[in-house]
Amino acid sequence: MSKYVTNELDAIIHGKIRLGIMAYLSSVGSASFVDLREKIQSSDGNLSANLSKLERVKYIKINKKFADKKPMTIISLTKRGRNAWIEYLSKMQALLAGGD
Amino acid sequence: MSKYVTNELDAIIHGKIRLGIMAYLSSVGSASFVDLREKIQSSDGNLSANLSKLERVKYIKINKKFADKKPMTIISLTKRGRNAWIEYLSKMQALLAGGD
């Protein structure tokens, strides 16, 4: 199979905002909504919509907790999410490496 | 600027089929329609539509010629296309490299 068959790339991860979310979470494991929003530089609505898509396929878990009596949303990469990321990463790296 | 600001990735290149086209052309410089279709494994219509988008922003040139009296379509990466590819590549590689 040619490495240029990009149609096989995971569309859930490939969306630009979700790609940023997955790349960041793969590095830090979990992050607060506020931290993620700052790193990705997206609006609340756009970030929420993309997090929902990732949650629906169980690539991330979203938990609400309280820190200093303030509600806080924590987003974590799941095992399934990490596996999907590793597969995406390996396909993309081959594609970007050049050569035939 | 955080490298996770993926919204800045070139949307013309990021589309899955166009990404395959650009990656392949960046490697070989130019290719026939038939060769490209085999490498990307896309339908004629889908490939044509994506080539048109790349041509519109002048990332590629499309030329028709005759080889053994048969018409042949040759697609080549332009200088502008190569520059856009290099920029995309550099952003993606940073993103995929991990770490914060």
Image (cartoon, coloured by chain):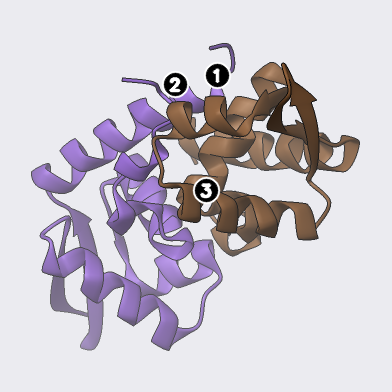
Chain colours: A brown, B purple
Along the viewing direction, whichever of A64 and B23 lies nearer the viewer: A64
Return the chain for callout 2: B
- Relative side of B78 to A5, left or right: left
- Residues marked 2 and 1 touching at CB (< 8 Å): yes
Taking the spot 48% from the left edge, 60% from the top edge, the residue there is B16
* Location of mark 1 (residue): B97
Disc 2: CA contacts within 10 A as few (<14), some (14-19) or many (>=20): few
* Location of mark 2 (residue): B94
The Cα–Cα distance between marks 2 and 1, rounded to whole angstroms, is 5 Å
Taking the spot 81% from the left edge, 38% from the top edge, the residue there is A63
Disc 3: CA contacts within 10 A as few (<14), some (14-19) or many (>=20): some
Taking the spot 65% from the left edge, 27% from the top edge, the residue there is A32
2 and 1 marks on the same chain? yes
Q: Position of residue A62 (x, y in %)?
A: 78, 42
The Cα–Cα distance between marks 2 and 3, rounded to whole angstroms, is 21 Å
* Location of mark 3 (residue): A47
The Cα–Cα distance between marks 1 and 3, rounded to whole angstroms, is 22 Å
Return the chain for callout 3: A
- Residues marked 2 and 3 touching at CB (< 8 Å): no
Relative to B71, say whether A13 is above or below. Answer: above
- Direction front: furthest residue: A69
Q: Position of residue A2 (x, y in %)?
A: 61, 54
Relative to B100, say whether A34 is above or below. Answer: below
